Amino acid sequence: MTTLTEADAIAGLRDALGLLKDREQVAERLLESSARHSFDPDKELDWDAPYEEGKWFWPPELVSLYDTPLWKRMSEEQRILLSQHEATALASLGIWFEIILMQLMVRHIYDKAATSAHVRYALTEIEDECRHSKMFARLIARGDAPWYPVSRLHQHLGRLFKTVSTTPGSFAATLLGEEVLDWMQRLTFPDERVQPLVRGVTRIHVIEEARHVRYAREELRRQMVTAPKWSQEFTRISSGEFARVFSVAFVNPEVYTNVGLDKREAVAQVKASPHRREVMQQGAKRLTDFLDDIGVLRGVGRRLWKSSGLLA
Ligand SMILES: [Fe+2]
Ligand SMILES: [Fe+2]
């Protein structure tokens, strides 16, 4: 009687599912797309145009306090100011994510042949993220709202994570960082109520980010079949924990103080807001459906995802 080795089982599963795409083929396609659609934000966007009176910096429905009792008491001017601070806080968060991601990518390719399309694409993605971080930094510097760093605890957790994370853990975290913000940015760039510069920044980011999401999804799908069992389980738990950090760090509470609101009251109202819960769950839905499909949302990991508020 022959015993089925693990490799046979994986190959069989792969064929049965017909899902795992060839790593090199995926990367070649992404390299072609990068060659066709990449932008230099310094040249592409009009950084000197003054901001337009009465325009939002983030769609109001995506501002954390939207539809809360506090929101109803705020003037239109204060709401717009809050949208500017939240957009700036999200740009700051975006830079934090991207810098973590760049290190994860560098670690991912360290042992791989640099001649492969998979590694060449990873290097291309790091180039994209360098441009994005510079673009977000320029957007922050362009307005009146400050740079919003994450808390010291999250800063240290990020340092630990980017140093020790496994490959599937890294790609799960990458998707979390990219997909929720991407969902919001897809609503932002076509919105005529929003400042043209913010629309331009989010448009560039959405176009280039679509490739990153594809790359991370294909790799994570492969990893959740081929990685050792302990590593798959670690991914379930670490991604659930990352989801909890993400949902707390998402909007820096200092934004409320800086627009003249009571921070504690504002945080409590955001937490209790059914509209906000709906926005965050809808923003994460494409991702959580995918993670569920590839077996990340199970057991303890699933419970952590639920407690993050991102999974219904
Ligand atoms: Fe990016
Ligand atoms: Fe990205």
Image (spheres, helix red, strand yellow):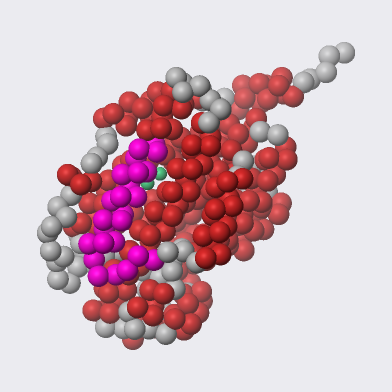
- Residue 92 place in picture, x, y as percent: 38, 60
Task: Determine if residue 269 is in view.
Answer: no
| Residue name at image x 32 percent, y 68 percent | 146
Task: Tell me if residue 130 is in the magenta stretch.
Answer: yes
**Quadrant location, the C terminus:** bottom right
Nearer to me, 44 or 25? 44
Residue at (65% x, 48% y) in the render: 236
When the figure is inspected, residue 225 is found, relative to residue 58, above or below; the finding is above
Task: List x then y, in percent, for residue 185.
Answer: 33, 54
Q: Is residue 142 left or right of residue 228?
A: left
Find the residue positioned furthest to the right: 1
User: Hey, which quadrant is residue 43 in on the image?
Assistant: top left
Q: Which residues are magenta?
A: 125-148
Q: Residue at x 61, y 60 (%)?
A: 306
Residue 76: % across, % down: 25, 79
Left or right of 282 in this view: 10: right
Q: Is residue 257 visible to the viewer in this orientation of the structure? A: yes
Q: Position of residue 72 (x, y in %)?
A: 34, 83
Relative to residue 288, is residue 191 drawn left or right? left
Q: Quadrant of the N terminus?
A: top right
Say which residue appears at 26% left-offset and 83% top-offset.
75
Query: Which is nearer the eye, 196 or 94?
Result: 94
Mainly helix, strand or loop, the magenta region? helix
Query: Going by the picture, which residue comes out furthest to the left?
Result: 49
Residue 309 location, quadrant = bottom right
Give the quadrant of residue 5.
top right
